[in-house]
Amino acid sequence: MRLVLASQSPARLAVLRSAGLDPAVVVSGVDEDAVAAALTDPEPADLVSALAKAKANAVVEMVSEPDAVIVACDSMLSIGGEMVGKPATAEVAKQRWARMAGGSGVLLTGHAVVRIDGGQRTKEASGTRSTTVHFADPSQAEIDAYVATGEPLHVAGAFTLDALGGWFVEGVEGDPSSVIGISLPLLRQLLAEVGVSVTEMWN
């Protein structure tokens, strides 16, 4: 049974490798904005779940292995009731940090798992995980320096926990791996739902 990670996130891959798995990586190429636009006023958990499912479904069509389990994720940060994803530009990243500094946000991660047996889609499961993140109050010079590295432009909420952004996170209430992008406790549960034991997939 081959594990396939439907994500180009190096952080998610690193979490899985550190946890004893060696997934193949297949990037979905899903238009996330189009998926989100097709939903009518979704709840935050429904939004990240729908995006994860869309990525998993796209990768099902790309996988050649007859027996595989596909794992897809999507993360967004809720700040003051607004859901935000990757900032993409330095200006937006600085605006995000102006709002986040000294406060808290809720990082939501949606997970979707699809099992393939004999080339056929047989089982699927999905779920979400919410984790509260408490941010430090970095100086403007620190924010400018962080944004200048380019790191926050490509991650949900404009911060990381496991890299440079970790300097500016005061604490986490909930699952730290979910903040990095993939919740190990939730993934273990979803794999079990499709009949896959995570311990049997350890290297």
Image (cartoon, rainbow, N blue to C red):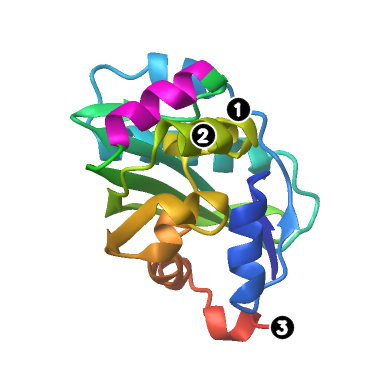
Q: Quadrant of residue 5?
A: bottom right
Magenta region, residue range: 91-100
Return the residue at label 2. Answer: 54
Q: Amino acid at mark 1?
A: Val
Near-viewer residue (13 or 67): 13
Q: Residue at x 30, y 38 (%)?
A: 101
Q: Residues within 10 Å of mark 2 (few under 14, many from 20)?
A: many
Q: Are marks 2 and 3 in contact (CB under 8 Å)?
A: no
Q: Are marks 1 and 2 in contact (CB under 8 Å)?
A: yes
Q: Residue 92 in magenta?
A: yes
- Is label 2 in a helix, a strand or a loop? helix
Mark pair 1, 2: CA separation: 7 Å
Q: Which mark is residue 203?
A: 3
> Percent position (x, y) of residue 93?
47, 26
Tell whether 37 sits left or right of 73: left
Q: Amino acid at mark 2?
A: Ala
- Is label 1 in a helix, a strand or a loop? loop
Q: Residue at x 56, y 23 (%)?
A: 88
**Can residue 152 be spotted in the picture?**
no
Q: Which mark is residue 30?
A: 1
